[in-house]
Amino acid sequence: MIDLRANREDFPILKTVVSGRPLAYLDNAATAQKPQAVLDATNDFYRESNANVHRGVHALSVKSTRLFDEARVKVQMLLNAGDVREVIFTKGCTEAINLVAYCLASPNGWLNPEVGEVHRLREGDTILVSTMEHHSNIVPWQLAAERTGAQVIPIPVTDAGEIDMEAYASLLREHRVKVVGIVHVSNSLGTINPVKEIVRMAHEAGALTMVDGAQAGPHILIDVQDIDADFYSLSCHKIYSPTGIGVLYGKKALLDAMPPYHGGGDMIRTVSFERTTYAPVPAKYEAGTPNVAGVVGLGAGIDYLACLGGGGREGLYRAFEAIHARELLLAERAAAGLAEIPGYRRTGEAPNRSGILSFVVEGVHPHDLGTILDSDGIAIRAGHHCCMPLMKRLGVPATARASFALYNTEEEADRLVESVMNAKRMFA
């Protein structure tokens, strides 16, 4: 297996000193740091290639367009999408989910009315989302329900932080389910959900599926064809790439049929005051000037990960295998140390999980814990993690969350334990 320890040197920000201590960055579920290769690609774009894409015949525009289009092919490889036109660039995972929810709630504008007749949301329809969803996979569906008269029903989770599959099956039988929104990896618990089975069951019930891959993208190699999701979203700043760039994968037949999301330049074929016709996908969903530098940086981020394993899709497989194993090792090392602290409780005990460690310590509020750890140079997240319904289910207002990445070390895991122990003593 690949030894990732040397790759820490690829991330300049990790040389930062906080409160006299080397930065231990354990907030990777919020955003990952960027390797020098991504920083260079983004800066090089602005220095050498900055021009709008798909609009000019001059040399800079041609070069910019080539870099932009090459990045889309790299995303296709990352996801194993069957068609490069199934890759839509957005400004983030949140926008990707909002795009799907908005379009499915649109009564008009479907370019294939027969598909729209089958899949658009109506009064009396049901949208299922799990109790462990990030707000970004709840609120867009609530807005869609308000527009259409549909209802949003939560799928319960167990005490261990797993989807209650029996309850899910019952909901599919008892309601007219049109959409199932499910997180691939919980951003709060680290639970890796059985999305392939969840999607299969949804399809048997005639429902479409929207899989939130924000926390899966940095840790496991995704295969959208194997999962068979209708839609899948990525948060690219979590995949060692720039902020302000996300990806929506959608099955081409659905993307072709759905109405546009935003109107503007580059998403049209013809415009007149009588009638506007639209460009084919992916342009139909990419109105206006895109975040070209972000897309180029994303391409460099995918290259970086692939090169860890020798290049190509096989290289990505080897890289993610090593990353997942490394992150789990560090998370379990930290969990074992924290378990020695009186009043420590881990939230989420699913056996299949990522390198996210979410916990509470009796007598120490998570926000106080986060502040004390910061004074020791350790960055974690404290709060509800945009998962208020899940926090209510767990019976806690907030948790502390440490989340590991390919560049973290055993020393940092041990520093986390030591600092939490000190905080417990302080509040005892």
Image: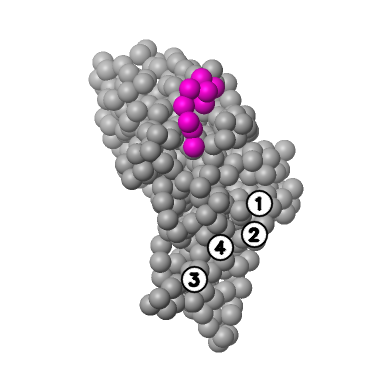
Q: Residue at x 48, y 64 (%)?
A: 286
Instruction: Name which of mark 4 and mark 1 comes first in the sequence.
Output: 1
Specify the amino acid type for callout 1. Ala
Contact (Cβ within 8 Å) of mark 2 with mark 1: yes
The residues colored magenta run 169-178
Answer whether residue 356 is magenta in the image. Answer: no
Specify the amino acid type for callout 3. Thr
Q: Nearer the viewer, residue 303 or 114?
A: 114
Q: Nearer the viewer, mark 4 or mark 1?
A: 4
Q: Give the secondary structure at mark 1.
A: loop
Q: Give the secondary structure at mark 4.
A: loop
Contact (Cβ within 8 Å) of mark 4 with mark 1: no
Q: Nearer the viewer, residue 156 or 207?
A: 207
Which disc, if any, is residue 81?
A: 1
Contact (Cβ within 8 Å) of mark 2 with mark 3: no
Left or right: where 8 falls relative to 397: right
